[in-house]
Image (cartoon, rainbow, N blue to C red):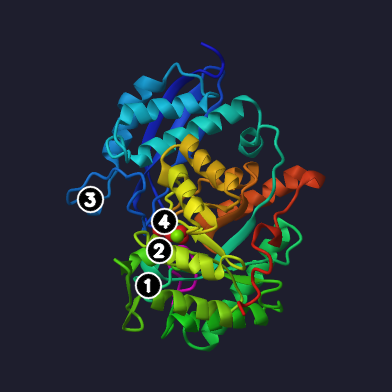
Amino acid sequence: MSRTSITHIVARRVWDSRGRPTVEVDVRLQGGATGRAIAPAGASRGTHEAIDLRDGGPALGGLDVRKAVGHVNGEIATRLVGMDATDQRAIDAALIALDGTPNKSRLGGNAMIAVSMAVLHAAAQAGHDSLCTYVARGRPVRLPLPEIQIFGGGAHAGRRVDIQDFMVMPLGAANFAQALEMTAEVYRAAGELMKAEDRLQGVADEGGYWPAFDSNEEALGMLVRSIERAGFTPGDDVAISLDVAASEFGRDGLYRLGLEGRELDRDGMVEMLLGWCQRYPIASVEDPLAEDDPEGMRAFTAAAGHRIQVIGDDFLVTNADRVRAAAATRSCNAVLIKPNQAGTVTETYAAFEAGMAADFGTIVSARSGETEDVTIAHLATGWNAGQLKVGSFSRSERMAKWNECLRLEEALGSQAVFAGRDVLPPDAGKPLP
Ligand code: 2PG
Ligand code: MG
């Protein structure tokens, strides 16, 4: 037994930002160091993600996690106690072997990611490091360029509009603190405009304003006006980023826009999105086509990828093999990195590394169901990912992550480096010709 040997692993049920049960795990090491992590939960999930194990049955809509908690306190603890917390690879390999399924459906991806991240935290604490410094392993760290939601939509807003995330990226910021200040001005301006036009109806799941719009494009217009009202130049100081989350309304090459009552084929969908990229200062588009439409992803990337970041989320599900395949076929040029899609820290990092190797943009991301857990703020900074997506600029499960990055920037002092517009393709944010 060394001071970094695991002595205790304890899971409990806690509650996420939608009031749903989720898994929290505490890990304790021989030398007294501790780590804690909480599993987040998506609403618009990719088909190939690690599975959240839910209990089913009538209580809590079937969403309880007592089985997953039981697995941690039972066979996972039995297997991992005595192992060295600093050997994350061995810990995650043991978890994967114990689960024995391709999609983590037996023990639960929620159980596994909470354990995996809690071990990482404990190991960092044992070395008296912040998590950010620990995962950097001596390599340069960088505060991420944030993409921050202003209007929610899709599965996070009762499908009031089809597009899921209408976000901004403060390209003109000189540091992370200023990036948040600029975003705060835009978020405030958007609220004022919504109020003035009698459209203010609260917020969606990630804290962005409820999308009381008559068309998807109307939200884009409102976003531009909000940026201007805040005193910034759209596309230069502040650009637009979209998560279309097209898998939610597209299948077999057909896309059904519920709000606008029309159906588009693959070409029609690509054409509509390119039109938006010509008329609005859009720097980044996530999941423009559905997860089952690589041909559509390729077509959009071929047409726009030189100027626009094209992110695979549901399309890549934080999976290294999928990232490599997408790079080989040029189906996108950036990868969203969500630890709970992969199910362990090691697999998350492998997907991130595959993205780096392909010269992809890399964006560490939260889920729509979140908690006070701030692990991703440290991963984005410590891994030098360049970008971070956390939802909007309200509600504490979101602000906890943004605020943690402020603390990291302060702690780094004069060493702090901020990832600005350089993480995006050249001229991103300028409308497509
Ligand atoms: C996404 C995320 C976050 P969810 O699609 O990128 O916005 O949503 O967690 O519901 O998958
Ligand atoms: Mg997404």
**Alpha carbon separation for disc pair 2 and 1:** 9 Å
203 falls in the magenta region: yes
Q: Quadrant of residue 254?
A: bottom left
The reply to whether the residue tagged 3 has its Cβ within 8 angstroms of ligand 1 is: no
In the image, the segment drawn in magenta is 201-210
Mark yes or no: residue 375 visible.
no
Is 202 displayed left or right of 250 in the figure? right
Which element is circle 1 on? helix
**Alpha carbon separation for disc pair 4 and 3:** 27 Å
Which element is circle 2 on? helix
**Alpha carbon separation for disc pair 4 and 1:** 15 Å
Amino acid marked by disc 2: Glu
Front tag of 4 and 1: 1
Which element is circle 4 on? loop
Picture residue at 61% right of the left edge, 35% below the top: 135
How crowded pointer 2 is (Cα within 10 Å; few <14, some 14-19, many 20+) is rated as: some
Q: Which mark is residue 266?
A: 1
- The x, y position of residue 19, in whole percent, is 36, 55
**Alpha carbon separation for disc pair 2 and 3:** 36 Å
Q: Which residue is mark 4?
A: 315
Q: Are the residues at dot 2 and dot 4 in contact (C-beta closer than 8 Å)?
A: no
Mark yes or no: residue 399 visible.
yes
Front tag of 1 and 3: 1
